[in-house]
Amino acid sequence: MTYTISLVESGVIRLAISGALDARTAVDLRSTLHRLLSRRPPYVDVDLAGVHMIDTIGVGTLIGFYKRLTAKAGVVTFSNVRDQPLLIFKVLGLDRLFVAYGAAAH
């Protein structure tokens, strides 16, 4: 798994993740998300276009980030979710909660 963090526009941070988001790779991502939370960004778009596989640990990592940032009045969207990750999100009912299809919705 690889990821990049970039400032897209005023206050919007995009976290683009590629590869598999699973028990092995989520550990590294969690530390990055913790550092990102400490900056208290107002809006984070998590772009999952490059994620080809996600497991329950990966989903839990994303949900934990979502809960912690929204508790601090931040906004999180998960954009470009497709293939196996989208299927997992749909099975868990997460697609109705916080998935922005296609480009990030602001």
Image (cartoon, rainbow, N blue to C red):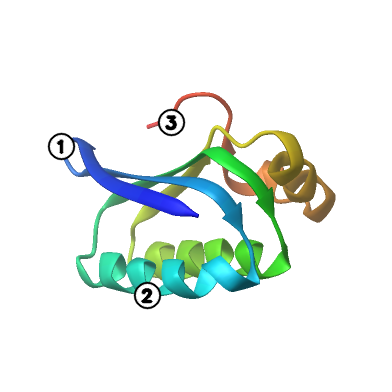
Give SS at disc 1.
loop
Name the residue: 37% across, 32% down.
106
Q: Amino acid at mark 3?
A: Ala
Q: Earlier in the sequence, mark 1 or mark 3?
A: 1
Relative placement, left or right, of 48 versus 33 is right
Relative placement, left or right, of 2 versus 58 is left
Q: Which mark is residue 87?
A: none
Q: Amino acid at mark 1?
A: Ser
Relative placement, left or right, of 49 versus 42 is right
Whole-percent x and y of residue 41? 24, 57
Q: How many marks?
A: 3
Name the residue: 42% across, 62% down.
70
Whole-percent x and y of residue 16? 40, 43
Q: Which residue is mark 2?
A: 31
Q: Which residue is mark 1?
A: 10
Q: Earlier in the sequence, mark 2 or mark 1?
A: 1
Whole-percent x and y of residue 42? 26, 53
Q: Earlier in the sequence, mark 2 or mark 3?
A: 2
Relative placement, left or right, of 35 versus 68 is left
Q: Amino acid at mark 2?
A: Ser
Q: CA distance from mark 1 to mark 3?
A: 14 Å
| Depicted 62 relative to depicted 80: above or below | below
Q: CA distance from mark 2 to mark 3?
A: 24 Å
Mark 3, Cα crowd under 10 Å, few <14 / some 14-19 / many 20+, is: some
Name the residue: 44% across, 30% down.
105
Q: Which residue is mark 3?
A: 104
Q: CA distance from mark 2 to mark 1?
A: 24 Å
